[in-house]
Image (cartoon, grey):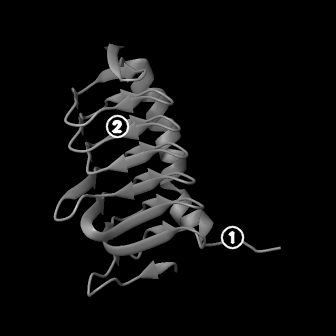
């Protein structure tokens, strides 16, 4: 696995998680059960701390980092879309972070909140539970409904099986 200790700070990875071989996990990073870390992702806990909950997908080329002595925290059943950057932010359970989004320092993304593709959630911003936020800077445009939740529960169930399915990956 692509795990690196840095100055005594060591990753802790659940045995049920999967980290793609070309992802990088450095320092004080905790990855929960059945979570999936995609190709090219970088989780760098060199002087800050990163915690990824259970059943969470950190997709291809994402970057997670935190300020010195601070924490980036990702909840359970979260999807962080391809090429997103999360820096000293908090993302609560069931949230969806769209592709190429930025969640900046001390921003807080609520339970079942959705951040649209390419959005920039500025430092110290709050996206409440169930809100949909889009744009640069991100602005709330609506609320997540039951149809959206059902759709994303199905997507998330697929990712929830990735950790186990990817263990069987065959190199060609």
Q: Which residue is pictured at 31% across the width and 41% down the height?
A: 104
Residue at the bottom extreme, as displayed: 8
Using the rendered view, name the quadrant where residue 55 is placed: bottom left
CA separation, marks 1 and 2?
Answer: 28 Å
In this view, the residue farthest toward the left is 69
From the viewer's side, name the closer residue of 169 and 108. Answer: 108
| Residue 148 drawn above or below residue 31 | above
To which residue does mark 2 refer?
95
The residue lying toward the viewer, choosing from 106 and 55, is: 106
Rendered position, 112 above or below 12: above
List the residue tagged with mark 1. 169
Q: Residues within 10 Å of mark 1 (few under 14, many from 20)?
A: few
Q: Which of the two residues, 162 or 78, is positioned nearer the viewer here?
A: 78
Residue at x 21%, y 64% (from the top left corner): 68
Tell me what residue is drawn at x 29 percent, y 62 percent: 50
Left or right of 83: which side holds 138? left
Q: Residue at x 49, y 52 (%)?
A: 62
| Residue 4: quadrant of the picture | bottom left
Mark 2 Cα-neighbour bin, 10 Å: few <14, some 14–19, many ≥20: many
Q: Residue most toward the right?
A: 172
Q: Secondary structure at mark 2?
A: loop
Q: Position of residue 148 (x, y in %)?
A: 43, 22
Give above or below for 103 relative to 20.
Answer: above
**Percent from the top left, x then y, of residue 15?**
40, 76
Q: Is residue 65 left or right of residue 107?
A: right
């Amino acid at each position: 696995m692509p795990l690196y200790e840095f100055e005594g700070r060591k990753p802790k990875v659940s045995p049920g998680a999967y980290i793609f071989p070309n992802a990088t996990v450095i320092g004080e990073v905790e990855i929960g059960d059945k979570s999936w870390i995609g190709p090219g992702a970088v989780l760098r806990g060199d002087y800050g701390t990163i915690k990824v909950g259970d059943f969470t997908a950190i997709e291809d080329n994402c970057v997670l980092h935190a300020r010195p002595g601070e924490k980036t925290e990702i909840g359970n059943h979260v999807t962080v879309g391809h090429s997103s950057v999360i820096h000293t932010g908090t993302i609560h359970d069931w949230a969806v972070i769209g592709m190429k989004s930025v969640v900046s320092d001390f921003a807080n993304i609520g339970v079942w909140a959705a951040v649209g593709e390419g959005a920039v959630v500025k430092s110290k911003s709050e996206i409440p539970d169930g809100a949909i936020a889009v744009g640069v800077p991100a602005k709330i445009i609506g609320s997540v409904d039951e149809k959206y939740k059902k759709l994303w529960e199905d997507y998330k169930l697929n990712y929830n099986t990735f950790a186990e399915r990817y263990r069987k990956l065959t190199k060609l």
